[in-house]
Amino acid sequence: MIDNGLTKTYTLRLTFESPVFLGSGAKISKKEYFYNTRKHTVTFYDSGKLMRCILENDLIDAYEAYMLGSGRTLYDFFRDNGGAPRFAEAVQYQVSSGNAIQGDGRQPADILTHVRSGAGNVYIPGSSVKGMLRTAVTVGCILRKMPNTQKPFVTAHPSTKKAMKAEADTRMRALDEELFHTLKVDSNKISNAVNSLFRGVSIADSPPISDKALILCRKLDVFPNGNRHELNLVRECIGPGTTVTMPITFDPSLAQFITPEFIVESIQSFDNWYTEHILSHYQGIPGFKLPELTQHLFLGGGNGYPTKTVTAPWLQDDAPHAITVWLTTLFGKKNARDDENYGISPHMLKYTTVNERKMPFGLCKVEIL
């Protein structure tokens, strides 16, 4: 820890125990990557360099026909035009695909890519980590002492969809303001970010992460009754076993009760709550080993509603019914009667498969050193 008299800087260490996906918002279509069925790898190409190879080898007509055709992949194009080595100079990087691509006999999927820095490197944005910690701290505050903020109303009438969402957003803002917007820098507008205690917590971006740490993962939904639904949705993830560190700095005059110790205690509170109220619904499913949460959070996308929101710990016993109503009203019948059928809503646990092992998305151990 570095103490300069005004701020204290610690090392935040994240150890990924399952694949972590932070989406860039981009995707690579099956026509743009090369899947090696024998090695179970996927190779990505620089589009500019690939086009130069195509032009130099007088293959523009063949490439145009390939792009306009349906049901074909880059593997087919390479096979028909001299093989992959002919285009080797255009290779960007290669990742292990396991059984994520055509693992169940279906056609190759588009691949959702991981976020990269302006320099083109895979990394973990500090803002994403701060958001994860903020959720944990909010849950910690809720479980210590139920806030005074009025909880969102519950109604299933379709005409209230817009009003319900607006009201829920208002209640969440009010909860945030009650817990954290207490600095009184702008007394005329409590919602102003200058009033937030989290101004006193800053987290730097991680150092670059090697492309060799990347793997591809297919989405797998698991039901409480043991049923599962594997989707043709593939994400480019940072693989389990990766460790990243980044500085986390506290300004005690602003952060006040949000200290390293409070964050660690909040993480443990979240873990206990998640184990009791979420994982308990999936006990005993053959082939699935549930994680043991001690000092863990879920980072990134695709992890599921309970890892990203504070609704369930806030509403407590009313949560299954309330969330069922909200999700059904907002998104249709997908979650209808979740509370009656499963006792939990949403009812699917978000998993994937890595080297034949089932594991959740985004699980990481969090340490402040």
Image: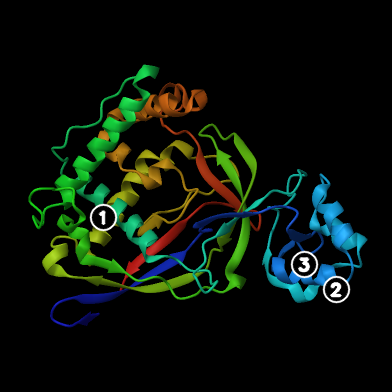
Q: Give the quarter of the image for residue 325.
A: top left
Q: Residue at x 40, y 73 (%)?
A: 245
Relative image position of residue 61 (x, y in whole percent): 88, 58
Residue that badge 2 annotates: 56
Instruction: Give the CA distance from mark 2 to mark 3.
Output: 9 Å
Residue 343 location in percent, x, y? 41, 28
Choose top left, top right, bottom left or bottom right for residue 89.
bottom right
Q: CA distance from mark 1 to mark 3?
A: 52 Å
* 180 lies left or right of 322: left
Quarter assignment of residue 365: bottom left
The disc, 1 or 3, on the residue closer to the chain's N-terminal end is 3
The residue labelled by disc 1 is: 266
Q: Amino acid at mark 1?
A: Ser
Up the image or down, 94 lies above or below 70; here it is: below
Q: Nearer the viewer, mark 2 or mark 1?
A: 2
Callout 3: 10 Å neighbours few (<14), some, many (20+)?
Answer: some
